[in-house]
């Protein structure tokens, strides 16, 4: 009887069932190249635009420029979230306040470093963020690095040191802002990586959640300065 039933039932052709297509290696490679080019071009573009604002238009209000950056970031991320291009996850504000403060300090200090230093020296100092991140991870979280990584970081530090010694437009205030920006940026990157892993957040969701607080911090500082 079971043989008859099995013979009478239509057989499912497993070959005809369409499996979900997976992206090819070439497609993944092209998307990675696109993201890298977009990241580099946008980073260089914002640096050049900021420098033009400071020099050509003699704009001397770094905090106001920081507020503009934060507001535009907030609006863009809210738009992406409402269009369904990114998920929504809202961790408690208290848990990300140190991250907001460090990010605010990182943006303000890098803008001040760009304002008081040349673009070339500013870019050289940004390169020093990677060795600073490695140093913080090694001292605070006991992260171990290979000899190849350590050698690369050492060469990077030597190159930045030579560039600093040969910088014609170097000044004490610009050097202070650059050093402070390196330290605060490195702290922000370390804390951001740990918070994203602990709270199980994607980077865009984390940035969107912080954006409103990051907009309010420079506004509060500006109001306090005006009152003082």
Image: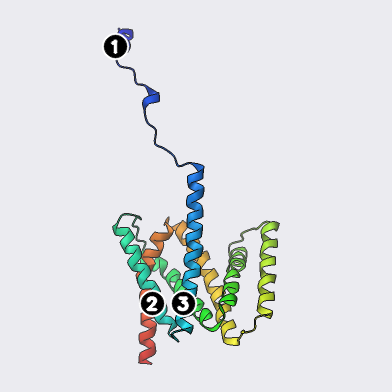
Mark 2 vs 3, N-terminal side:
3
* Quarter of the image where the C terminus is located: bottom left
In the image shown, does 79 or 148 lie closer to the viewer?
79
User: Can residue 37 be seen?
Assistant: yes
Give the label on residue 133, or none.
none
Q: Name the residue under label 3.
A: 50
Alpha carbon distance from label 2 to label 3: 13 Å
Number of other residues with Cα within 10 Å of mark 3, as a class: few under 14, some 14 to 19, many 20 or more: some
User: Eyeballing the image, is 108 above or below 5?
Assistant: below
**Badge number at residue 8:** 1
Is residue 108 visible to us here?
A: no
As helix, strand or loop, the secondary structure at mark 2 comes to helix
Local crowd at mark 1 within 10 Å, few (<14), some, or many (≥20)? few
Quickly name the residue at label 2.
Answer: 67
Q: To which quarter of the image does residue 145 belong?
A: bottom right
Q: In this view, does 103 lie to the left or right of 91?
A: right
Residue 151 in which image quadrant: bottom right
Q: Are marks 2 and 1 in contact (CB under 8 Å)?
A: no
Q: Picture coordinates of residue 213 (x, y %)? A: 36, 72
| Quarter of image, res 95 | bottom left
**Image location (x, y in percent) of residue 108:** 47, 78
Give the image location of residue 102, x and y in percent: 47, 72
Depth order, front residue of 144/160: 160
Q: Please tell me whether mark 3 or mark 1 is closer to you in this view.
A: 3
Residue visible at 43% across and 59% down in the picture: 203
- State the scheme by which the image is colored: rainbow
Q: Which of marks 2 and 1 is nearer the N terminus?
A: 1
Q: Disc 3 on helix, strand or loop?
A: helix
Residue found at the very far front of the displayed protein: 56
Residue 122 shown left or right of residue 68 in the figure = right
Relative to 100, residue 228 above or below: below
**Rendered residue at 42%/71% (across/down):** 100
């Amino acid at each position: 009887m079971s043989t008859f039933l099995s013979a009478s039932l239509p057989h499912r052709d497993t070959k005809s069932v369409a499996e979900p297509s997976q992206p090819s290696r070439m497609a993944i490679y092209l998307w990675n190249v696109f993201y890298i080019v977009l990241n580099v071009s946008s980073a260089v573009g914002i640096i050049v635009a900021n420098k033009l604002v400071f020099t050509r238009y003699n704009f001397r209000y770094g905090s106001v420029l920081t507020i503009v950056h934060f507001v535009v970031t907030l609006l863009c991320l809210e738009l992406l979230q409402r269009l369904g291009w990114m998920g929504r996850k809202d961790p408690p504000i208290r848990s990300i306040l140190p991250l907001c403060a460090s990010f605010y300090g990182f943006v303000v200090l890098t803008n001040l470093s760009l304002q008081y230093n040349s673009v070339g020296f500013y870019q050289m100092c940004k390169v020093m963020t990677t060795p600073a991140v490695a140093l913080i991870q090694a001292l605070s979280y006991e992260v171990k690095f290979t000899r190849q990584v350590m050698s690369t970081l050492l060469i990077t530090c030597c190159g930045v040191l030579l560039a600093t010694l040969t910088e014609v437009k170097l000044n004490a205030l610009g050097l202070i802002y650059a050093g402070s920006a390196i330290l605060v940026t490195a702290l922000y990157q370390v804390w951001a990586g740990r918070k994203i892993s602990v709270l199980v957040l994607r980077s865009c969701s984390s940035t969107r959640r912080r954006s409103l607080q990051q907009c309010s911090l420079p506004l509060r500082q500006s109001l306090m300065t005006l009152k003082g």
